Structure formats: structure tokens, C-alpha cells
Amino acid sequence: MSPDDLARAGLRLDLDLDGALATVTLDRPEKRNAQTPTMWRALAALGADLPGSVRVVVLRGAGASFSAGLDRSLLLPGGAPDGVEAVGDLFALDDAAMAATIADYQAGFTWLHDPRFVSVAAVHGHAIGAGFQLALACDLRVVTDDVGFSMKESVLGLVPDLGGTKPLVEAVGYARALELCATARTVQGPEAVAIGLALRSVPADALDAAVQELVAALLGPAPEVVTETKALLQGAAGRELAEQCRLEREAQVRRFRALGAGGPG
């Protein structure tokens, strides 16, 4: 989806394209950027339509919070206005249709794993439930010292289902991930860095500068180098060493051939 498409649809998302940088902003500050199924579908469409020239995607929230999670008014059956898709609509579906709909919702998060670009979450205020999972969908997280991460799904009798469990385990390990999901406790910036959940924690007024610094560093190497490296690292934990070494060799052959041909990288 283009910036104009998002504006016309009133989807409360803002997309700013600046050369190789795309900034996606959740723009529902009066609701602490609470998320909706319509927003998830729009995020999936945005990811599918992102120009190939984009090398870094920054995801942020307008106002006082990154995202307070699911809009709770859309959770119960009949809680949404007519014509508005609600999570509560899932109750009326059979198992297969429910799972298929959740898969559509997950696509609004999983596009951020695309190896064509590096995704960065700039997280402040609250990152709760779906907000936590949206931050986890990004490759890197820069956070404020007073940020509050909390996986609240267990409080609602649910499990995290928006693609957040795998990156959470990869970031903090199984035991810590289980503790965070089961207890729904809040993790603030310094602890998030200490346990591997965030790359860096800064005072709130330094967040923009820290993200800009990271973006500049990410845009330094040639695009193909970052793409190849991200693809290598994404699956490394699940591969045998011999398989990983084979993939490294193949990627490096491509790099040498590109350099030999006088390519930019």
C-alpha cells in the first residue's frame, strides 16, 4: 500500500518513503496505538507493496506509546460497529476458518522478517501483547529506558499468536520466554537489553537520535551484503554446522562474483 492508499483508507498507519528508508508509524495515539484486524491486514499489504529500493524499515508509534496491543473493544463477539472486522468474529468460525483468519493476521507481522531489508522497532511507552509481538517481528529493537514490554495474552486466556513466540525464544531463550508469557510481567528498557530483548536502551528524548544513528550504520554496507547476511543469520540456529558452512560458501561465491564483475556489492 502506498502512503496515499493508507491515507484514503483511513487505516491509521503512516508510511514515509525516503530513498532506501521506509518509516511505518502506527498513528492512533488517542488509543495508545491499539491494534485492529484491519490494521494487521493493511500492514501485510504494505509489506507486500514495499518498493524494492527499501533497505531499512523503521517501525514506530505516534504519541505516548509504541502500541498498547489489541483494541480490547474488538475482542468480544458483537463488540465492534457494523462493518468493522473484530477479533471477536473468530468465535463464529469453524476451526479451519479461524486458523486461516489468524494466518492472515500473522502476515501483518511476518513481512518484517523479509531478508531484503533490516527492520528496526523504535519502542517507547507501552509495548503490550500485540504491540510486544510487533516489536519482536522486527530484526532490531531500540527502546527507551521507561518502556514497558508485557505479553498480556495469558491474562485474557489466550496465547501469543501473531508470530511472536519464535523471535522471543530466539532473543531471550526458552526459560525466560516462558516466564514472560506465563506471568505477563513488565520488562523495562535496561532489563530488555540485559536479557537480549533489545539492542539498546536510551532516555526517551534520545530515542530518535539513537534510531537515526543505527539506520545510518545499516545503510552503509552494500545492499546485497546486508541481504545475504540477514538470510544467513536468520536460519543459523536451526541448521547443522555443515549446512550453515555450505550456505556461507555459496553466499560468498556470489559476493566474489559480484565484486569481480565490478558490481556495487
Image (cartoon, grey):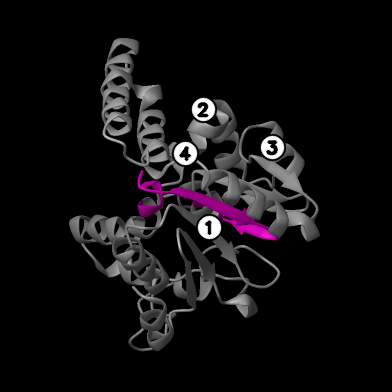
Q: Is residue 99 visible?
A: yes
Could you say where residue 214 lies in the image, as x and y percent from the top left? 62, 47
Give the labeled residue for mark 3. 193
Helix, strand or loop at disc 3? helix
Give the labeled residue for mark 2. 174
Q: In the image, what residue occupies the spot 35% across and 89% down?
A: 82
The reply to whether the C-beta atoms of the residues labelled 2 and 4 are less than 8 Å apart is: no
Q: In the image, what residue type sits under mark 2? A: Tyr
Give the labeled residue for mark 1. 58
User: Nearer the observer, disc 2 or disc 1?
Assistant: 1
Region rendered in magenta? 111-133
Dot label at residue 167: 4
Helix, strand or loop at disc 1? strand
Quadrant of the image occupied by residue 77: bottom left
Indicate which disc, 3 or 1, sits on the residue closer to the N terminus: 1
Q: In the image, what residue type sits under mark 1? A: Val
